[in-house]
Image: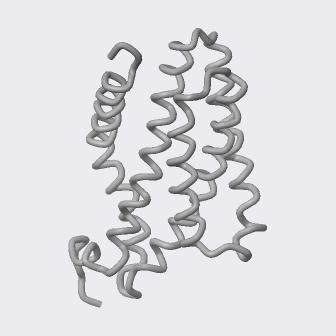
C-alpha cells in the first residue's frame, strides 16, 4: 500500500467533525477540573468537599465505562455523542447556579456519566476513516489532542477567566 499523510486523513468526510467533538469532550473534562475548585472555594467549601465533588466525577466515569459493554449494543454511537454534548452544556449552565456541595456532586456525577459514556468516539473515529487509514485514524486522536493540549488549556483558562469577569457579581 502507498503511504498517505495525516493531512489526507483529515480530509476524510466526517473525521474532522468527529475530532472536533472529541476535542470538545476532552476540553470539558479539563474545564470541570479547573472550575470545580474555583467554584468550591468561592462558595466556602472545604478542600475535602471539593475533593469529594471531583472524586464523584471520577467514580461516575469509572462506573459508566464498566457499563458500556452491556449498553453498547442498545445505543447508537452518534446519539450518545450528541446527548453527551447537550448534557454537558446543560450541566455547565447549571453549575454556577448551584451553591451546595451536595448539588455540585450531583452535577459532577451527571457530567462524569455523560463524558465517560462518550468513550464511543474512539470507535466512531475508526469507523469514519477509510479502510486504508483506520490504524492512522485510531492513533490520530491522542497525538492531535496532545498537540492541542497547550492551546486547549490556555483557551479554557482564559475563557473561564473572561467569563467570570463578565458574569461575576459586581464584575
Residue at 40%, 67% in the rendered image: 18
Q: Nearer the viewer, residue 39 or 23?
A: 39
View extreme (front): residue: 170
Task: Please name the residue shown 68% across and 73% down the image.
Answer: 75
Viewer-side residue, 106 vs 62: 106
Number of dots carrying numbers: 0
User: Which is more toward the observer, 1 or 57?
Assistant: 57
Q: Is residue 111 above or below residue 65?
A: above
- Quadrant of the drawing holding the C terminus: top left
Q: Is residue 124 left or right of residue 163?
A: right
Q: Residue 70, image x and y in percent?
A: 78, 67
Q: Position of residue 17 (x, y in %)?
A: 36, 68
**Looking at the picture, how far across and down is residue 144, in whole percent?**
32, 56
Residue 55, quarter of picture: top right
Q: Quadrant of the N terminus?
A: bottom left
Q: How is the image coloured?
A: one colour
Measured as percent of width and height from the top left, residue 105 is found at 68, 31
Point 28% across, 34% down: residue:
154
Amino acid at each position: 500500500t502507498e503511504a498517505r499523510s495525516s493531512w489526507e486523513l483529515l480530509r476524510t468526510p466526517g473525521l474532522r467533525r468527529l475530532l472536533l467533538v472529541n476535542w470538545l469532550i476532552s476540553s470539558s473534562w479539563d474545564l470541570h477540573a479547573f472550575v470545580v475548585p474555583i467554584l468550591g472555594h468561592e462558595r466556602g467549601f472545604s478542600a475535602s468537599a471539593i475533593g469529594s465533588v471531583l472524586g464523584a466525577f471520577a467514580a461516575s466515569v469509572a462506573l459508566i465505562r464498566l457499563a458500556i459493554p452491556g449498553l453498547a449494543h442498545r445505543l447508537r454511537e452518534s446519539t450518545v455523542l450528541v446527548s453527551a454534548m447537550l448534557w454537558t452544556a446543560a450541566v455547565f449552565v447549571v453549575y454556577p447556579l448551584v451553591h451546595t456541595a451536595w448539588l455540585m456532586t450531583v452535577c459532577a456525577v451527571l457530567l462524569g456519566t455523560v463524558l465517560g459514556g462518550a468513550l464511543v468516539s474512539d470507535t466512531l473515529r475508526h469507523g469514519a476513516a477509510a479502510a486504508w487509514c483506520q490504524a492512522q485514524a485510531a492513533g490520530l486522536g491522542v497525538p492531535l489532542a496532545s498537540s492541542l493540549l497547550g492551546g486547549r488549556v490556555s483557551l479554557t483558562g482564559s475563557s473561564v477567566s473572561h467569563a467570570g469577569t463578565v458574569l461575576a457579581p459586581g464584575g
